[in-house]
Image (cartoon, grey):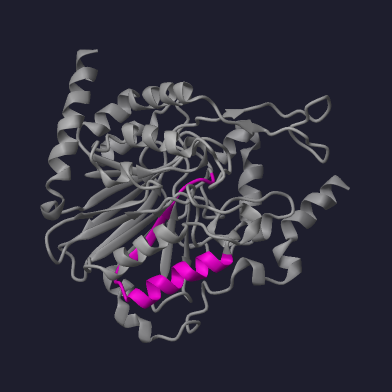
Amino acid sequence: MERLVAAVLAAGVLQVLVATADDHYLLSRIAFGSCANQSAPQPIWDAINKFDPQVFIWLGDNIYGDIRRPFIFLGKERTIGPWQNAPRFIPSSSSKMLSRYNSAKNVPGYLRLRAKAKVVGTWDDHDYGLNDAGKEFSAKSTNQRLLLDFLDEPQDSPRRKQAGVYTSYTFGPPGKQVKIILLDTRYHRDPLSSDGSVLGDSQWSWLGKELRGTPSAITIIGSSIQVISNLSGTTGPLFYMESWGRFPKERDRLFKLINDSKRDGVFFISGDVHFGEITRYDCAAGYPLYDITSSGLTQAVEKVLPSPLRFIVRFLAWFTPSTMRVKNQNCRYRSCTYGEPNFGAIQIDWDASPVNLKIQVRDINGLPVTGVDISLSELQAWNRTIKAGQDQRHCTLEVKLPWIVRYRLAILVYSVLA
């Protein structure tokens, strides 16, 4: 207990010291993750602590604050199926949300991390307060305060006065600066079927200023939902996942903003989907835009089946078409996805010429399951002279695939059922 108290006090002091030293803090190791159920065992913090990050980024579902009701097909209240008449998820009270945040904040492995690294983050739906919720959610202001308390956000922070939890940080000396931009994809988001706004007018204005502002060697944009991948385009009509791809106008606007800003070294990190993967899009700007997805710290898609049957999940992940996924020799499985607990790891070699980025998704033991090595020279604005579409490796959107390819997962499932 004494060690835990000391760790908490040290974490508070560290947050203050690092917050005042961002401009001079040479950043070379960053970890990130999402989807951590506070009620589940969290042994993955041992691997994260062993990686020894200087900064850890929460990408949402930092707790599971809403209440998940059981699957009910028949009866007065049906939570699933064609006759569903009751919601599967319902919000919990602010006191229960606070209790769950307190449980998450006092996990021993996370306490050790807080004692030596700066922790920043944004939210997704389950810590926002309700599964798949957007701007219509009534408890968002209260839950914003709870999230910022969990992140030890200073009481005078602008984040406590604005509508939404978006923010940015800059680390490092001139010439070696890393800018971290964290988006809020919940507070202002229109309904999923609307093709409306993800960020809202005020956040779009802020993001434009951030991208057109002082240059940095590297710019990491954190989004709770995937930016590049749109697997819903190939998993529907069986099931759909949240992503920027379900708001095509907004995603095009995001890509255009990055392109017009002529900012170097931009890539995305994301969470939400309960598996890890790396995707890229070559036709949005003059250089490839990567999205490294790490999900989740406890929640994982393979956990839905007993261990002997998890090969089925891996087969379906391989069989489902994905035009954006990076497939190389660094993948543990043929699908180049990873459906067990994982975290993201970024290493920056500032001494290399040109500067090198090693970005990986790692397992519970800290071993890589997929990764990319990127020379910073590949992410340069001068490459914008290359015509969009010249490199066709990752340019075909999932929704543009021939229908027999796009819907082959649904065809397989319906054929098996038949």
| Position of residue 263 in the picture relative to residue 277 (left or right) | left
Measuring from the top left, give residue 99's x and y in whole percent.
42, 21
Q: Quadrant of the N terminus?
A: top left
Measuring from the top left, give residue 175's x and y in whole percent.
14, 67
| Image height of 72 relative to 261, above or below | above
| Image height of 318 relative to 104, above or below | below
Q: How many marks?
A: 0
Q: Nearer the viewer, residue 268 or 300?
A: 268
| Position of residue 154 in the picture relative to residue 243 (left or right) | left
Q: Nearer the viewer, residue 314 or 52?
A: 52
* Residue 287 visible (yes or no): no
* Residue 20 visible (yes or no): yes
In the image, residue 262 lies in the stretch drawn in magenta: yes
At horizontal 41% and vertical 24% (from top left) the residue drawn is 98
| Residue sitting farthest toward the top | 1
Measuring from the top left, give residue 6's x and y in whole percent.
18, 21
Measuring from the top left, give residue 215's x and y in whole percent.
22, 69
Query: In which image quadrant can residue 290 be found?
Result: bottom left
Q: Nearer the viewer, residue 314 or 101?
A: 101
Query: In which image quadrant can residue 114 be found?
Result: top left
Q: Nearer the viewer, residue 395 or 20?
A: 20
| Image height of 280 relative to 166, above or below | below
At horizontal 30% and vertical 72% (from top left) the residue drawn is 263
| Image height of 185 relative to 246, above or below | above
- Which residues are drawn in magenta? 248-273
In the image, residue 329 lies in the stretch drawn in magenta: no
At horizontal 78% and vertical 27% (from top left) the residue drawn is 77
